[in-house]
Image (cartoon, rainbow, N blue to C red):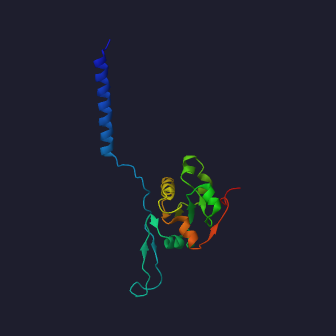
């Protein structure tokens, strides 16, 4: 029958092997990204005005985080809009024609109701309460993991959109009965 020191030695050996396996795995594989990827570039502000003209608009390449003006341009051009806030906040007021899609709906298996109406090849503007709110970035990450790569986050969120008197609506999502 093994003695206590033999058990302790076996335990230490097993723990050491586990630690070495974890370190090897960490050295080989990339760490998980906590922030969503930037979408492929889109240049806003192009027109028929020659680029050499002093009146030519400045072209802007969009990344993951976008301004209110950039969000408005995308929405006007037909981008999907996703509200990542709570249900109560959505029903009290949201950007017109928004999909209500907080990240927790993906975890609960309830995101498909909104995804059925969204084209993965169309740009998506995602917003939450603005400022320090992470809900829009969390939803962007979930959308990207589900094949929707063209995601942008309106950093100033719904408060900025509403303050600019851009189109808003109230009530539940249009795709619900």
**Residue 3 at x, y = what percent?**
30, 14
Towards the viewer: 133 or 6 = 133
At horizontal 56% and vertical 61% (from top left) the residue drawn is 82
* Rendered image quadrant of residue 28: top left
Towards the viewer: 59 or 90 = 90
Does 112 sit above or below residue 38?
above
* Rendered image quadrant of residue 117: bottom right
**Residue 100 at x, y = what percent?**
60, 58
Q: Residue furthest bottom?
A: 54
Res 123 seen here? no
**Residue 11 at x, y = what percent?**
32, 25
* Rendered image quadrant of residue 168: bottom right
Q: What is the number of callouts on the image?
A: 0
Towards the viewer: 161 or 106 = 161
Q: Quadrant of the N terminus?
A: top left
Q: Residue furthest right?
A: 177
In the rendered view, does 2 fall on the left or right side of 85?
left
At horizontal 30% and vertical 40% (from top left) the residue drawn is 23
**Residue 161 at x, y = what percent?**
56, 69
At horizontal 48% and vertical 55% (from top left) the residue drawn is 141
At horizontal 54% and vertical 72% (from top left) the residue drawn is 72
Res 145 seen here? yes
In the rendered view, does 36 fall on the left or right side of 77?
left
Q: Quadrant of the C terminus?
A: bottom right
Q: Residue furthest top?
A: 1
Towards the viewer: 168 or 111 = 168
């Amino acid at each position: 029958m093994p003695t206590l020191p033999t058990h302790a030695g076996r335990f230490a050996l097993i723990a050491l092997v586990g630690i070495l396996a974890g370190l090897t795995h960490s050295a080989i594989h990339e760490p998980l990204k906590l922030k969503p990827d930037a979408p492929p570039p889109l240049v806003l502000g192009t027109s028929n005005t020659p680029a050499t003209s002093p009146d030519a608009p400045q072209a802007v390449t969009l990344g993951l985080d976008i301004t209110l003006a950039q969000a408005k341009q995308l929405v006007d051009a037909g981008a999907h809009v996703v509200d990542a806030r709570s249900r109560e906040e959505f029903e009290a007021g949201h950007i017109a024609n928004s999909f209500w899609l907080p990240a927790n709906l993906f975890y609960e298996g309830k995101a498909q109701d909104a995804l059925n109406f969204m084209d993965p090849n169309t740009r998506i503007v995602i917003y939450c309460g603005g400022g320090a709110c992470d809900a829009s970035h969390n939803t962007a990450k979930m959308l990207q993991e589900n094949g929707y790569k063209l995601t942008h986050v309106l950093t100033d969120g719904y408060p900025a959109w509403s303050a600019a008197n851009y189109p808003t609506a109230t009530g539940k999502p249009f795709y619900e009965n």
